[in-house]
Structures are given as C-alpha cells and as structure tokens.
Image: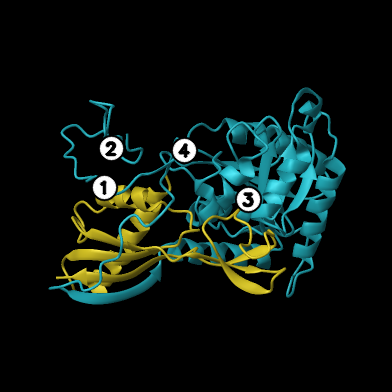
Chain colours: A yellow, B cyan
Amino acid sequence: MHEMALSESMILIIEQEAVRQRFDRVKTVCLEIGVLSHAEPEAMGFCFEAVSRGTVAEGARLEIQRPPGEAWCMDCAGTIEIARRFDPCPRCGGHQLQVTGGEELRVKELEVV
Amino acid sequence: MCNVCGCGLGEGGSVPASGEPGHVHHHHHDHAHHHEAGAIDYGAGPARAHAPGLSQGRMVQIEQDILAKNDALAAANRRRFAEQAVFALNLVSSPGSGKTTLLVRTVEALKNELPVAVIEGDQQTATDADRIRATGVPAIQVNTGKGCHLDAQMVGHAADHLKLSVGTLLFVENVGNLVCPAGFDLGEAHKVVILSVTEGEDKPLKYPDMFAAADLMLLAKTDLLPHLDFDVDRSVGYARRINPEIEVLQLSAKSGEGFDAWLAWLRAGREAARSGPGQRVADDDQISL
C-alpha cells in the first residue's frame, strides 16, 4: 500500500512547514487527490491517521478535493472529461487521449492552531 | 467489510489492518462504499467532500506535491545518469511474470558487448541479485522490507554502490507489483511493463496507472501462446486504450523468439543516451555514480 509512503511524505512536508511557518498543531489538512491519480482517498485517510501519531498532525482531519480527470482528444482536438483512464472520448468514442488533468497529489493548505 | 481497515460488516471479529493490540478503532464509516452490480468501487466519487468555511485556526498555504521530494531525487538520478551516459530502465510487472528470467537471458546476450548492471528490488531475499551475479554482471539487491515499491532515494543509494562504467545499460527490476511502483519516478529513461501471456489480457484495464506510465510493454512467455486462449491483439488494444503511444514487443525468454527486436531496442536506446547533448563518452572510465 503505497499510500503509507505518500502519507509519510505528507508528514515530512507538514513538519517542515511547522518550523517555517511556526505552528504547533494541525487541525485540518486540505489535499488534492485527482480522480486519475494513483492514490485512494480511503487508504490515504487510514494511512495518514497511522503515520501522523506523535506528530503535529496527530488527529488532523483530511479534507480531500478530487479534481476531475481531463484529457485532450487528438481526434476531436478538444478537452474532454474522463472518470477513468480507459474511458473513451464522450464525443467521438476514440481512445487517442492524452491526460491533462486529474493526476494531482498535492497538499494544498493546512488549518493550524 | 471495509478493505481499508478490515473492520466490518458481516465479518465479526476481523482484525484491523494495523494489527495493533488494543488498537482503538478511529476509522469511522462515514464514507460511502459504491456498490455496482456486485462490485465495491473505492475509486468512484468523492470520499469526503471539501467543506468550505473552516473556522477558528489560521489557514496556511502549502501547495506542495506530495511526491515532490521523490521527484527531486529522481531528477538528480536522471541528471547523474545523463552525465555518465547510463541508459536506465525501470522494469515493472506483477510477481511471477518472469522478469528475472527475462533479465538473465538479456544480460547473457549483451554482457560481452556493453557494460550492464542491475538493481534488484524485492521485499525480502537476495536471490534475484544472486541470479544476476551468476552471469558475471554486477548486481545489487535492495530489500524494501514492508515497502511495496522502489523509490528514487533507494535507487540513488544503490547506484552509489555500483561501480558503473560510462555507457552502462542499467536495469532496475522493481518490486513485483502493478500498482504501487507506477507513481514513483526513479530517474529512469523509460518504464518497461512486462505482461506475461499467462496473465489476463485485460490487465492493462485492471491496472491502468502502470500501463499509462510505461513507454514499452513486453508481452512475455509467448512460447506458451499455443496452449492458451490469450488474445494478443485484444491485449495490445487494451494497452493502447490506456496509452496510445505505448510500444509493444513480444518475446519469450525460454525460446528466445522476439529477443532480436528487444535487444535492438535496448542498443538503440543506449546509443541515444551516449550521443545525448553534452555527453563525454570515454568507455574505459570507471565512474562511481
């Protein structure tokens, strides 16, 4: 479950920011996990809870935004929305798609005290 | 039951995934499990909607990619490989696809022609590195312990330990896993995904992230095709639905069929790495990367 490694990276980012921006406790972590990213929000929640124990983010709540999957259809020459990587273009039914959005894995902001 | 934590409906007494004695169960079931025709899809729909108007504490802007640190280390690896004209490949597949057997035959075919080295990733044991070293080629084993993938730091560290000649063809055999290694850049020139014909032809659809990340798909164990119902065209079609650009080669490490094309692909990639911009190519230099 690579969400464990991703959660550890999140803690690293948060602890660096805790020093830089001077806060002692995180109440909320706002995350972007794109619909086409390789992380599962459910698993992230579980792993983050485990990994955050004993850190400034212990007990913090995850607020997860899910940017939609976006792709450029080479046949239609336009941007379309897809829910999964193997979805066809909703306009032409083709698969000549280049993913342009929805792969985000970002810590956006923190609510701190 | 919930496959995230193991808690659950109709499965009384199941042990939470954390396995800790006295584990206090914080994992609230406030999420929706999407049920569709007998399937439970954790990938569908927002898990927890973003609630605006957070109160009390102050908001701190972060805007950092979670993988930023790995990506920076991967970029450093890629720079070092480019400087030394090392052509690095990240081999990914399910367990049991025959990666190591394929690698052994590849190494045997090329070892007298050009410098080859291997980084082997597994959770445990050094048996794969032993198999490579038996060919006379340098190999280093990375055991990830509980980890399910190699990361850029592990590969950088392993490369430190291998005395790589300029112009080396470096294979990184990732942990057998079609899920987790997809997101972790190691600094390789290409991810190469190996799909053996004893697996389902629909694997590209089941594990799309990996097939999206790979530049080349090796369809392996083709000597077994006469005994199987595996539809090669359908499998390639599925892979190209995910990744229209993916190259495909078919081969068998047992019979050797298809190996000429694979070796030609490797030679061409290595030559391109050696003639890249700003290359200082001196074949006899031993350089520790």
Residue with the mark numbered 3: B211
In the rendering, at what x and y percent does residue B162 appear? Answer: 61, 50
Quadrant in the picture for residue A72: bottom right
| Nearest to viewer (mark 1 / mark 3) | 3
Density class for disc 3 (Cα within 10 Å; few <14, some 14-19, many ≥20) is many
| Nearest to viewer (mark 4 / mark 1) | 4
Name the residue located 34 percent from the left edge and 60 percent from the top edge.
A10
Q: Which label was assigned to residue A50?
A: 1
| Nearest to viewer (mark 4 / mark 3) | 4
Quadrant in the picture for residue B12: top left
Q: Which label was assigned to residue B18?
A: 2
Identify the element where label 2 is drawn.
loop
Q: Is residue A63 left or right of residue B266?
A: left
Q: Is residue B117 left or right of residue B141?
A: right
Q: Amino acid at mark 4?
A: Ala
Identify the element where label 3 is drawn.
helix
Q: Amino acid at mark 2?
A: Ser
Residue with the mark numbered 4: B37
Looking at the image, is mark 4 or mark 2 earlier in the sequence? 2
Identify the element where label 1 is drawn.
helix
